Image (tube, rainbow, N blue to C red):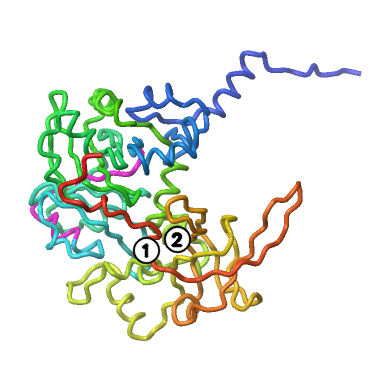
């Protein structure tokens, strides 16, 4: 009887395969510095880039945001350069907010929808000059943006790989930038931006962020990324600057009541089921819509839903009794009727409250806000215990810090 020999991979081949499966495809321009600080080796894939959940201690990283200054690599965020004589008209057509009111040197938070009025994504729009913009978002939209540019004299190019980005957030962030030699940064008000010299090139600094705290975002050519990192780290050594991962940032953004695409709502291009789609009014973005503004994507459907009162969902902030986070908990009315789902939750060290974001089915969370409950499963000595906790609808942000908007910024 003939037996075929079993072919076993060599140790080198097996190690190579395992190494390949563990290695994410891309590193950002800041990767050498981040890898050196990654004591926990706790990585995830952000748009194909290797990004840290946590670098050294997720609890202390959170407190670095709130008591010192935190440095977070936002290079994987999708970035588009949009410029040309029709750039303003084009962006006014595809995004919700009135771009004609966005002056050069300013930033606004905006979103964009498909023709049925469902949100494709949200992001920030930077007006760098009269005819030049940068649009930053979570998802990639280049084919859609190019299709939408038909008959506009405008160019749209993705610049994610050539522009590196950092978020510098926390009470000492202004002092660090000043000490780093960025003269005039004290003049930036919330949502202002300006360009500064750096290492023979230019860095764009905006007073923006995703933490609800005093903070800035910096954009620099990729080949000047490491020198910018080193400049900030040197200037911030005595003011407690620390590099952080996404877990800490996510906690801060929840305290600020900010939403994340494909976490707190499903982007229209990703939704498989029709009941997962959301209009701006259903995720707290209705403030962006000006009914007097001219045509924009989804305008007719959005205004019709308002007029006919056919909006089906509402995103709310919840305060929940107790101190056990209600992550992904089901929300009930009168303890029995399922009316929604929690998308993000935490015990807030700043607010000293158990807080959450939840998507509820109207009228719950809209006109009916009493007798709401969440179902939490808490691990107690290797067994899950079901807890029913009262929840009440509360305004966002959960934490509001005066230093975020102080002019001039405080020198902590």
> Where is residue 95 shown, x and y percent of the image?
25, 61
Q: Residue furthest bottom?
A: 308
Give the secondary structure at mark 1. Answer: strand
Q: In the image, 304: left or right of 14?
A: left
Task: Identify the residue at horizontal 38%, vertical 32% (top origin).
Answer: 243
Residue 82 magenta-highlighted:
yes
Dot label at residue 81: none
Query: Distance from label 2 to label 1 (Cα)?
Result: 9 Å
Magenta span covers which residues? 75-91
User: Residue at position x 46%, y 57% from top?
Assistant: 270
Front-most of 411 and 330? 411
Q: Name the element at disc 2.
A: loop
Q: Earlier in the sequence, mark 2 or mark 1?
A: 1
Q: Residue at x 42, y 61 (%)?
A: 268
- Position of the C terminus, as image quadrant, is top left
Q: Quadrant of residue 339?
A: bottom right
Residue position for label 2: 265
In the rendered image, the vertical position of residue 168 relative to residue 152, given as above or below: above
Which quadrant is home to the N terminus? top right
Q: Name the residue: 31% across, 51% down.
A: 143
Instruction: Determine which quarter of the picture holds residue 376.
Output: bottom right
- Relative to 66, say whether 366 is above or below: below
- Residue 63 vs 335, above or below: the answer is above
In front here: 200 or 189?
A: 189
Callout 1: few (<14), some (14-19), or many (20+) C-alpha neighbours within 10 Å?
many
Q: Is residue 260 left or right of residue 185?
A: right
Residue 318 vs residue 153: left or right? right
Residue pointed to by mark 1: 119
Position in image of residue 338 (x %, y %): 61, 73
Q: Residue furthest right?
A: 1
Q: Are marks 2 and 1 in contact (CB under 8 Å)?
A: yes
Task: Note whether 107 is above or below 275 in the view shown.
Answer: above
């Amino acid at each position: 009887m003939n037996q075929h020999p079993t072919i076993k991979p060599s140790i080198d081949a097996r190690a190579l395969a395992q190494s390949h499966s563990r290695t994410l495809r891309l590193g950002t321009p800041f990767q050498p510095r981040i890898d050196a600080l990654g004591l926990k080796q706790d990585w995830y894939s952000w748009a194909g880039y290797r990004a840290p959940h946590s670098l050294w201690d997720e609890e202390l990283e959170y407190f670095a945001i709130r008591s010192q200054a935190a440095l977070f690599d936002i290079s994987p965020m999708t970035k588009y350069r949009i410029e040309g004589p029709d750039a303003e008209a084009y962006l006014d057509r595809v995004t919700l907010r009135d771009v004609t009111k966005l002056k050069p040197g300013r930033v606004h938070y905006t979103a964009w929808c498909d023709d049925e009025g469902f949100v494709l994504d949200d992001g920030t729009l930077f007006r760098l000059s009269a005819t030049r913009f940068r649009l930053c978002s979570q998802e990639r939209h280049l084919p859609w943006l190019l299709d939408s540019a038909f008959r506009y004299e405008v160019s749209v190019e993705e610049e994610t790989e050539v522009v590196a980005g950092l978020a510098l957030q926390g009470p000492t962030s202004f002092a660090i930038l000043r000490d780093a030699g960025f003269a005039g940064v004290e003049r930036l008000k919330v949502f202002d931006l300006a360009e500064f010299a750096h290492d023979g090139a230019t860095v764009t600094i905006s007073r923006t962020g995703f933490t609800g705290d005093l903070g800035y975002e910096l954009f620099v050519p990729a080949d000047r990324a490491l020198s910018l990192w080193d400049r900030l780290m040197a200037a911030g050594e005595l003011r407690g600057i620390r590099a952080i991962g996404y877990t800490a940032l996510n906690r801060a953004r929840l305290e600020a009541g900010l939403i994340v695409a494909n976490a707190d709502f499903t982007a229209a291009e990703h939704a498989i089921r029709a009941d997962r789609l959301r209009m701006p009014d259903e995720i707290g973005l209705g403030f962006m819509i000006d009914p007097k503004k001219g045509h924009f994507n989804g305008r007719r459907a959005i205004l019709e839903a308002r007029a006919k009162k056919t909006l089906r969902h509402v995103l709310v902030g919840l305060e929940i009794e107790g101190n056990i986070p209600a992550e992904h908990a089901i929300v009930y009315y009168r303890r029995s009727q399922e009316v929604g789902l929690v998308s993000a939750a935490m015990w807030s060290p700043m607010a000293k409250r158990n807080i959450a974001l939840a998507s509820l089915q109207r009228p719950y969370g809209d006109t009916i806000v009493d007798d709401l409950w969440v179902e939490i499963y808490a691990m107690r000595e290797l067994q899950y215990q079901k807890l029913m906790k009262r929840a009440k609808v509360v305004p966002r942000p959960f934490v509001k810090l005066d230093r975020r908007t102080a002019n001039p910024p405080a020198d902590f």
